[in-house]
Image (cartoon, rainbow, N blue to C red):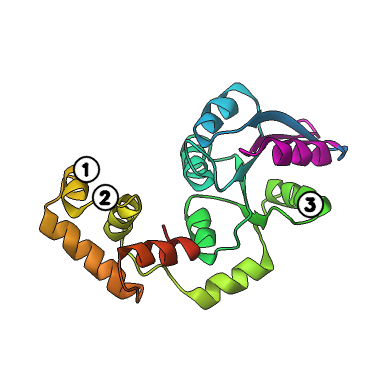
Amino acid sequence: MSSTIRVLLAEDQSMVREALAALLGLEEDIEVVAQVARGDEVLAAVREHDVDVALLDIEMPGATGIEAAAQLHREFPALKLVILTTFGRPGYLRSAMESGADAFLVKDAPAAQLAAAVRKVLAGERVIDPTLAAAALAEGANPLTDREREVLRAAADGSTNAELAAALHLSQGTVRNYLSTAIQKLAARNRTEAVRIAREKGWL
């Protein structure tokens, strides 16, 4: 195996992506071999390039970093996955770990810390931002079921119950029940507030 760690960088903001690539490129043992701006381009890029570690931004068009991580984990179980986020939302951490991520870091961490994390995950370690880890423990588990999350996510654009029912192949009564339960669990006044609360906590 080459002593150089081959990295894929997935980040939709070009300035941030280029800055991260430049900083990692300064490390003697790390080479950024591929860059993509969309989550749905990650899998093809990994198939094309011989990658050791994938750095995935959590918020990308096409697919989130968590969704991309889950795809990669299924197809390339040996590949190491590092999730990067601007948002310190504790719910994201749990989702990232469930998707197979080996590390979860905030983007404003020092470059040396990111490079160290790349080396650590390749050595079999798990790296988690300590502040996020503490917040996730304090926050507890996501109270929403998969179905409640699906309906709440679909409701975020203001769709009516009838529209949601048609899109999700459910009855209007079932949609109403899921929304009502989600609103209750989140102690929200309405679906709009429920969506906001769930997003802020990283539960959607």
Q: Quadrant of residue 166?
A: top left
Tell us which disc is closer to us: 2 or 3.
2
Q: Range of the magenta residues? A: 1-25
Left or right, residue 128 beside residue 152: right
Q: Position of residue 203 (x, y in %)?
A: 43, 61
Is 204 magenta? The answer is no
Q: Is mark 1 on a helix, strand or loop?
A: helix
- The residue under the point 52% across, 36% down is 39
- CA gap between label 2 and label 1 equals 10 Å
Q: Pointers 2 and 1 in contact (CB under 8 A)?
A: yes
Residue 32, above or below 123: above
- Judged from this view, the residue extending furthest toward the top is 48
Q: Which amino acid does label 2 sit on?
A: Ser
Residue that numbered label 1 is attached to: 167
Q: Position of residue 157 (x, y in %)?
A: 34, 49
- The residue under the point 73% across, 38% down is 15
Q: How crowded is mark 3: few (under 14 residues within 10 Å), some or many (20 or more)?
A: few
Front in this rendered view, residue 118 or 146: 146
Left or right, residue 203 beside residue 109: left
